[in-house]
Image: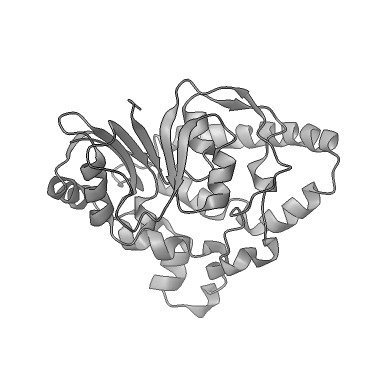
Amino acid sequence: MRSPSLDLGCGDGTFSFIRAGGEFDRSFDAFRSVAQLDQFFQNVDVFDSYDEGVVSAATKPPRYQIDMGFDHKNNLLKKAGQLGLYGALKQGDGNQSLPFPDASFNSVFSNIIYWLDSPQFVISEISRILKPGGGRACLMLPNSTFPKFSFYNQLYVNGGDDRWKFLEMLDRGRFADNIRQAKSLDEWEAMFEQAGMKIERHHSHLSKLTIQVWDIGLRPLFPVLLEMSKELTPEKLISIKAKWIQIMKTFIEPLLELDKTLPGNEELAFHCFELRK
């Protein structure tokens, strides 16, 4: 992230903070700062909330700072502001022209383009705000295989069988947006060329197995698990969390190793592009 740098769609900043080498102690829990939990299955973003009593529990600062964090949700920006990662934060709509002058940044990271209305427009905007002759962007984008790995899409949307309608509650509107923007490597490359950017590095990740585990995960149990956790004392919660993490690692770490060997000739679900203007 060569300065000046931008995290486009930074959310609460947690993932970028960890990617930059920051660490939290075990008391940190992003899932406890929520609202409207009773509407979880009505596609409400329960994380769009801010609790002044929930403070960051960062124990190790990030290795670098990002000059600007940009997101459309003010509550998430308030959370991001606690991390010491961003030099400044700005609220705005990624579907509109980005509120930055031409050639403002040397580097841009984004993992939200596929949630927006027009990928071509926002990719062109990223190109506009990058410095010519060396400005770089790292973009995470869904492959055309991504919708094929969704239980909801395959069993209900494509199959049309009403017995699977209950999966709408599991999907919570995620694939309605993501499916629209899932594209092949060639299709994404054509958009980059139109915007004046070239692929410098590319790799794919996330097999069908991993996507299907993520697709369900603990999502159906999330509201009741959170309700249970709030009945615990802070000390007991941390003790149980330690056991929880160990059990999850026992299953997730070998799963990720399998992820490297199972796909075979099958295309993976997501692209990571490093682009140069």
What residue is at 47 percent from the left and 60 percent from the top?
174
Of residues 34 and 215, the one nearer the viewer is 34
Side (left or right) of 221 relative to 240: left
Q: Is residue 200 above or below residue 221?
A: above
Q: Residue at x 23, y 55 (%)?
A: 120
Q: Residue 155 in the image: x percent, y percent?
A: 45, 68
Percent across and percent down for residue 236 are 84, 36
Q: Position of residue 208 (x, y in %)?
A: 41, 49
Q: Residue at x 63, y 51 (%)?
A: 218
Left or right: 171 in relation to 223? left
Establish if 119 lies above or below 21. Answer: below
Looking at the image, residue 4 sits to the left or right of residue 44; the answer is left
Residue 80 makes an appearance in the image: yes
* Image quadrant where residue 40 sits: bottom right
Q: Quadrant of the C terminus?
A: top left
Is residue 255 something one can see in this rendering? no
Q: Is residue 266 above or below residue 275?
A: below
In percent of width and height, residue 32 lies at 70, 47
